[in-house]
Amino acid sequence: MAKNDTKSDTKTETARSPRNPRKPASRSTAASRPARRPASAKTETPYHHGALREALLQAAERVLERDGLAGLTLRAVAREAGVSHAAPTHHFGDLTGLVSELAAIGFRQFNAAMASACDAATSPLQRALARPKAYVAYAQAHPGMYGLMFRTERLDYSRPSLHEAAESSFAGLANAIGAMRQEPISGDALTIEQGAAIARAWSMVHGFTMLLLDGRLEDILERLPDGTTAEQLLEAILRSTVAGKLPT
């Protein structure tokens, strides 16, 4: 009878005990193990919220200069920046919004390059040559950005940043023509003569730039004396254009 009681007590104790007791060491190991990140997050670059917009624009410029306007998509920009595909849409709305903000940056860089060149000039002739030479130099250094800036059908000029930057660029051109004509020129109201002078100067420099970027000036350059550069050809054009028109 005593043996049966002992067996019964042993069975009862076994039933009360958990079948798979956790070891304290297991809990400690689990607690110290870092949580796994989703696989997709490994390829993303963390940005502070305020810096992400700038990072996307920088990525967009790299894509534009490397792959051209046809390769500039929201997905390509997100991939270049290392962020989720939704990030560009969140900051710019759509592709038009993104390229418009990118063009605004281009115009600001463009304007700054021309202003800096004019500030460095020390004579009326140097100032007359500085702006168009800087214009062409910027386009050569940033052909993708330059092409985007003049693709009006892809841009939204109602966006304040782009409107302001483009207006500043036009004002710089108008002021340069006004200085050559020795008269103030208001960007809001032009005489036909002022408008013609601005259009003539812009057409000449923009046309030269596009021919240069498209490689269409090579035939002319090959016929010139050895070593003649496109910049020298441009300067010869400019000098013949401004001769006798500068203030003394």
Image: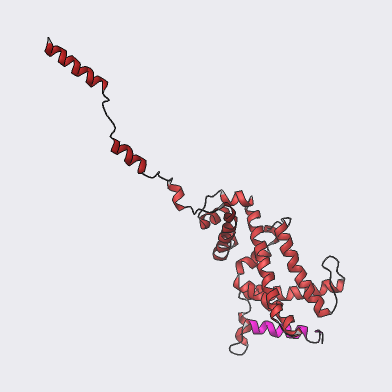
64 and 106: which one is in front?
106
Height in image: 147 above or below 52? below
Residue at 52% from the left image edge and 57% from the top image edge: 81
In the displayed structure, 5 sits above or below 143; it is: above
Quadrant in which residue 63 is drawn: bottom right
- Which quarter shows the C terminus? bottom right
Instruction: Name the foreground residue: 162 vs 20.
Output: 20
**Residue 205 picture location, percent across and down:** 71, 75
Q: Identify the residue at image location x=38%, y=45%.
A: 34
Q: Nearer the viewer, residue 189 or 148?
A: 189
Query: Which residue reaches farthest right?
Result: 191
Q: Position of residue 117 (x, y in %)?
A: 68, 78
Residue 215 place in picture, x, y as percent: 60, 75
Name above or below for residue 8 compared with residue 226: above
Which residue is at a point 82% across and 73% down the rendered structure image?
A: 196
Q: Give x and y (percent) for residue 44.
A: 48, 52
Q: Main secondary structure of the magenta part?
A: helix
State which region is magenta: 231-248
Figure quadrant of the N terminus: top left
Q: Is residue 72 visible?
A: no
Q: In the rendered view, does 40 fall on the left or right side of 114?
A: left
